[in-house]
Image (tube, rainbow, N blue to C red):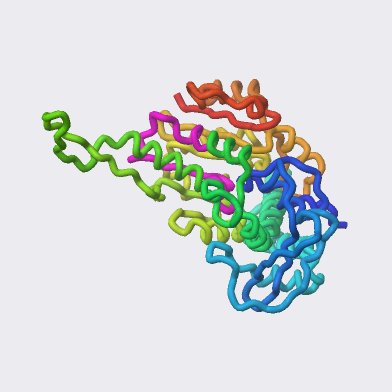
C-alpha cells in the first residue's frame, strides 16, 4: 500500500518554501506549500494535448486540495499557458491518462516506477569495491553501502515524483498570479505568500552577510530542488553588489553657482549568476530548475559522493530543507566544513521549522527524510569540534528586528555555522 505517496509533496521546501499542513492529496500539498496562510479559490482544470497541459479556471469548486482529486477533462489546446511553465514529462502525462486524471494515483505510479529504476541502477550497478561475502568486515561494509544506495534511491524517486508534476501546479498558479501585485512574482510560475517571502529573504541574508565581497563569491545550494531560493539569493546578491560598488558615471553639475562632481551609480538589474551552483540527486528537479533559471548552474549530484566538490572551496553552503535527508548529520556538516574557504558559512534552514521536519520523519519514511533538525546545543557541540561559531537569527538580521513568528526554530529553522 502506498499511502505515503499522498504526503510526498510535504518534503518540498525550498525547495518549495511551504508551510506545514496535514493534507489529503498532492494537489492539497501543493496548495499548502505555496499558500500556507490563505485559502486558494477555484480549481484548475487541465486541457490535455500530446506535448503539454494548459490550464483554465473552473468555477464553483473548492481549493486545489478540497474534495476534488481528479484533473477534469477538457478540449485540446495549441499553446502552453506561459513560457515560464515547463512541459509536463511524458511519463507523467501517461500516468495521468492511465488514471483518468487522478493526481494521487498518477504520482504513486510514477514514484514506484522511479524507485524500481533507481534500485536497479544503484544496487545492480558496479560496486565501489570487490568484497568477500565470507569476510565479516567486508560483508558489513557491503551492507552499509547497500543501505546508503537504498536510501538514495528513495530520495531520488520521491523528489522525481514531486518534480514531474510541478508543471501542473505552475500552470494552475498562473491564474491567481495574474491578479497579484508585481512584487509578489519573484518566483517564475508561482506565488509566494508574505511569510514565506520574509523567511526566504532572511535565508538569503544569512547566506550573504553585509560584508560579503560579491566579486569573489562561490556559493553551493545543496538539495536545490527547482531553484526556489534562487530569486531571493539573486536579489540579495544584487543589493550587496550595488552597495559595495563605489564606481559609476560622473558629471559636473552647477548648483547655487558652484560646480560639483556628481556620481551616478548604475543599479544592476540582474545578478552575475556565476556565483551560484545548485546540486540535487533528482534529475527531474534539476530539469525544472534549469528551465526556470537557465542562466544558473544546476547539476545532478550526490553531495556526499560527488568527487568534483573536493577540489573546490565555497564562501557559503546552503542546506535549505535538505539536511533531514542525510543519514548522518554530523558527518554531513563535517564534510561541508572541509569545502569552505576561510570565513565561510554553512547555512541550515527550513521554512516550515523543526516541528514540521520531526513530523515528516515520523510519518513519511518512504520519502527519505531520516533525521530531525539539530538543536542549537547540538550545533554548538558540532561547531566546537570543527572550529566554527554559531550565528543566530538576531545576529543575522543585525539592527533589523526578527518577526515574532520567526523567532522559534520550531516554526522557522535558520542557523549559521561560520568558519573562524
Q: Where is residue 173 in the image (x, y as percent from the top left)?
A: 65, 57
Classify 94 as above or below 70.
Answer: below
Q: Where is residue 412 in the image (x, y as percent from the top left)?
A: 65, 32
Classify 84 as above or below 49.
Answer: above
Q: Can residue 132 be seen in this view?
A: no
Residue at 56% over, 61% down: 287
Q: Position of residue 78 (x, y in %)?
A: 60, 78
Residue at 61% over, 46% down: 192
Quarter of the image for the N terminus: give it.
Answer: bottom right
The stretch in magenta equals: 204-229
Residue at 52% over, 33% down: 346
Of 71 and 292, which appears nearest the observer?
71
- Find out whether residue 17 is within the magenta segment: no
Of 213 and 53, which appears nearest the observer?
53
Residue at 81% over, 71% down: 100
Horizontal side of 94 relative to 323 (left or right) equals right
- Which quadrant of the structure image shows residue 410? top right
- Find out whether residue 215 is within the magenta segment: yes
Amino acid at each position: 500500500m502506498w499511502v505515503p505517496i499522498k504526503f510526498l509533496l510535504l518534503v518540498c521546501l525550498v525547495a518549495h518554501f511551504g508551510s506545514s499542513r496535514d493534507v489529503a492529496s498532492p494537489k492539497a500539498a501543493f496548495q499548502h506549500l505555496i499558500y500556507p496562510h490563505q485559502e486558494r479559490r477555484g480549481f484548475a482544470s487541465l486541457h490535455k494535448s500530446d506535448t503539454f497541459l494548459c490550464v483554465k479556471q473552473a468555477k464553483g469548486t473548492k481549493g486545489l486540495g478540497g474534495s476534488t482529486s481528479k484533473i477534469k477533462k477538457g478540449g485540446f489546446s495549441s499553446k502552453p499557458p506561459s513560457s515560464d511553465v515547463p512541459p509536463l514529462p511524458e511519463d507523467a502525462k501517461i500516468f495521468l491518462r492511465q488514471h483518468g486524471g487522478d493526481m494521487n494515483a498518477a504520482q504513486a505510479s510514477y514514484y514506484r516506477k522511479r524507485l524500481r529504476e533507481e534500485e536497479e541502477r544503484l544496487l545492480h550497478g558496479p560496486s565501489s569495491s570487490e568484497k568477500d561475502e565470507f569476510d565479516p568486515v567486508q560483508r558489513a561494509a557491503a551492507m552499509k553501502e547497500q543501505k546508503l544506495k537504498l536510501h538514495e534511491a528513495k530520495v531520488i524517486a520521491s523528489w522525481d515524483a514531486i518534480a514531474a508534476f510541478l508543471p501542473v501546479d505552475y500552470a494552475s498558479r498562473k491564474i491567481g498570479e495574474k491578479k497579484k501585485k508585481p512584487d509578489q512574482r519573484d518566483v517564475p510560475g508561482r506565488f509566494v505568500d508574505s511569510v514565506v517571502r520574509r523567511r526566504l529573504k532572511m535565508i538569503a541574508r544569512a547566506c550573504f552577510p553585509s560584508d560579503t565581497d560579491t566579486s569573489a563569491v562561490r556559493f553551493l545550494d545543496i538539495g536545490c530542488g527547482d531553484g526556489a531560493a534562487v530569486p531571493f539569493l539573486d536579489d540579495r546578491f544584487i543589493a550587496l553588489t550595488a552597495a559595495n560598488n563605489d564606481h559609476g558615471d560622473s558629471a559636473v553639475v552647477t548648483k547655487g553657482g558652484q560646480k560639483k562632481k556628481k556620481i551616478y551609480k548604475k543599479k544592476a538589474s540582474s545578478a552575475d549568476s556565476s556565483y551560484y551552483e545548485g546540486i540535487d540527486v533528482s534529475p527531474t528537479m534539476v530539469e525544472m530548475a534549469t528551465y526556470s533559471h537557465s542562466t544558473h548552474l544546476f547539476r545532478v549530484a550526490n553531495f556526499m559522493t560527488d568527487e568534483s566538490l573536493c577540489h573546490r572551496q565555497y564562501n557559503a553552503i546552503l542546506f535549505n530543507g535538505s539536511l533531514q535527508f542525510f543519514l548522518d548529520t554530523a558527518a554531513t556538516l563535517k564534510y561541508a566544513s572541509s569545502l569552505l574557504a576561510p570565513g565561510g558559512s554553512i547555512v541550515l534552514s527550513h521554512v516550515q521549522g523543526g516541528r514540521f521536519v520531526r513530523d515528516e520523519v515520523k510519518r513519511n519514511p518512504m520519502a527519505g527524510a531520516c533525521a530531525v533538525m539539530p538543536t542549537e546545543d547540538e550545533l554548538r557541540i558540532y561547531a566546537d569540534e570543527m572550529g566554527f561559531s554559531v550565528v543566530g537569527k538576531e545576529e543575522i538580521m543585525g539592527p533589523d528586528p526578527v518577526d515574532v513568528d520567526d523567532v522559534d526554530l520550531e516554526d522557522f529553522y535558520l542557523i549559521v555555522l561560520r568558519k573562524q
